[in-house]
Image (cartoon, rainbow, N blue to C red):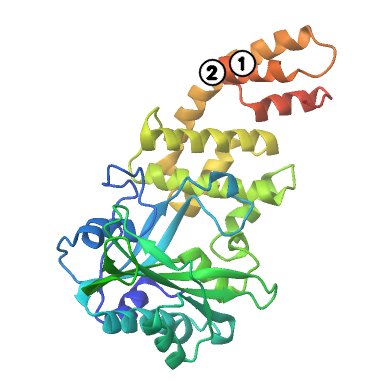
């Protein structure tokens, strides 16, 4: 993967000005976190507010919680990730903006990063003749997709998208690599009230780009993730790759939040951090990885262990005090049961004492019982 300086240089030749990543916690009251590079420019794109530069390129650190259950399983979804994006903010007409956005993204992937053009294609809205012509000029195979539409959050403007899709030559599986979004119509009816100057924003996950460069089967097998997952696996007594990937992902998100000044709590972003640390602790219990080792491994991979150890340790200490009450009640129930705990027992422990179902299952397995 090219350095950020090389990203800056490449897009600079197309007139894009570098903007540093803003904090991961969003200034938008409707969002907890910045979930993409584009949300940073929402006021500009939705309402036409001025920005100091009309062409911007950035790598924005993001965090999404909507796909929490997919983490560790899909190989393409992550809690915390960096998103490469470039933006044209109402500084040109449709043909000019689409040309510079599409060509700069395409040249970066193929000429700068060396991703084979034979593995790439593009999806285009059937009525987006301008994007179609540009892709044809670049010699790129296209697929029509009438779902390539976009609306601003306030639905006062709308437009179309075109996506660059990468097909893994080893597995034959395809994934969206780069999404380019064009806001070009007033209102929420496509192809009616055209804006004189259009806006464009884009997003390309750094993890997915590295996966495409290295032709990895999943993000977790690329060089960004291999090392930390391998180290966690060596420490674990349970050889479950999905769990190791999930644990690594939780660690990255928690470390990044702590490194940006967040502390575990009961509200908003602070609660998300608490949830991350506590789930990681539970997974460490299930896999027999000493939690302090997990913290050192994650801290050194994504920031520094010294910067996060105290925060993680304090939160787990609080969590363990609550768990102790749950364990005592668990032992009382066990003393009255010959077989496994009932479903109502498990719900009682979880809802009344905050004793997680995953840890109940672990305790039951240790005494040779299967939970219902």
Image position, residue 253 (x, y; %):
47, 47
Q: Which residue is mark 1?
A: 326
Q: Looking at the image, which is closer to me, 143 or 68?
A: 143
Label 1: how many residues lie within 10 Å, few (<14), some (14-19) or many (20+)? Answer: many
Residue under the image location 61 percent in, 26 percent down: 356
Vertical arrangement, residue 187 with respect to residue 184, above or below: above
Judge by depth and name the residue closer to the eye, 18 or 178. Answer: 178
Where on the picture, by quarter, is residue 88? bottom left
Disc 2 element: helix
- Where residue 40 appears, as percent x and y from the top left, is 28, 57
Decide if residue 140 is on the left or right side of residue 267: right
Assess disc 2: are there few (<14), some (14-19) or many (≥20) residues with their C-alpha within 10 Å of its C-alpha: some
Q: How many marks?
A: 2
Q: Residue at x 28, y 68 (%)?
A: 185
Q: Is residue 287 left or right of residue 88?
A: right
Residue 208 placed where, x, y %?
52, 66
Q: Residue at x 28, y 79 (%)?
A: 94
Q: What mark, if any, has residue 322 been given in the picture? A: 2
On the image, the x and y values in percent for residue 269 come to 38, 38
């Amino acid at each position: 993967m090219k350095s950020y300086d090389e990203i800056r240089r490449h897009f600079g030749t197309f007139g894009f000005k570098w903007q540093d990543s803003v904090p991961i916690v969003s200034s938008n009251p409707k969002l907890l976190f910045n979930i993409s590079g584009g949300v940073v420019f929402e006021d500009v794109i939705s309402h036409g507010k001025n920005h100091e530069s009309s062409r911007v390129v950035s790598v924005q650190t993001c965090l999404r919680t909507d796909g929490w259950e997919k983490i560790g399983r899909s190989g393409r979804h992550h809690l915390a990730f960096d998103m490469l994006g470039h933006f044209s903010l109402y500084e040109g007409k449709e043909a000019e903006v689409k040309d510079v956005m599409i060509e700069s993204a395409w040249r970066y992937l193929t000429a700068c990063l060396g991703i084979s053009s034979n593995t790439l294609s593009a999806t285009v809205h059937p009525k987006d003749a301008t994007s179609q012509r540009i892709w044809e000029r670049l010699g790129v195979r296209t697929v029509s997709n009438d779902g390539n539409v976009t609306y601003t959050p306030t639905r006062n403007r709308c437009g179309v998208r075109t996506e660059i899709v990468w097909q893994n030559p080893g597995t034959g599986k395809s994934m969206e690599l780069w999404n380019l979004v064009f806001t070009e119509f007033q209102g929420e009816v496509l192809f009616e009230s055209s804006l004189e100057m259009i806006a464009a924003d884009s997003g390309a996950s750094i993890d997915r780009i590295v996966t495409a460069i290295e032709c990895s089967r999943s993000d977790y097998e690329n060089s960004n993730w291999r090392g930390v997952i391998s180290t966690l696996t060596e420490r674990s007594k349970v050889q479950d790759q999905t769990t190791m990937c999930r644990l690594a992902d939780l660690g990255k998100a928690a470390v990044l939040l702590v490194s940006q000044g967040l502390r575990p709590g009961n509200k908003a972003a602070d609660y998300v951090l608490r949830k991350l640390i506590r789930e990681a602790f539970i997974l460490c219990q299930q896999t027999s990885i000493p939690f302090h080792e997990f913290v050192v491994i994650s801290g050194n991979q994504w920031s520094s262990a010294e910067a996060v150890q105290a925060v993680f340790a304090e939160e787990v200490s609080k969590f363990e005090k609550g768990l102790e009450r749950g364990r005592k009640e668990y032992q009382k129930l066990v003393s009255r049961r010959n077989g496994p705990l009932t479903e109502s027992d498990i719900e009682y422990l979880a809802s009344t004492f905050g004793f997680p179902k995953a840890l109940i299952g672990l305790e039951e397995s240790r005494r040779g019982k299967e939970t219902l």
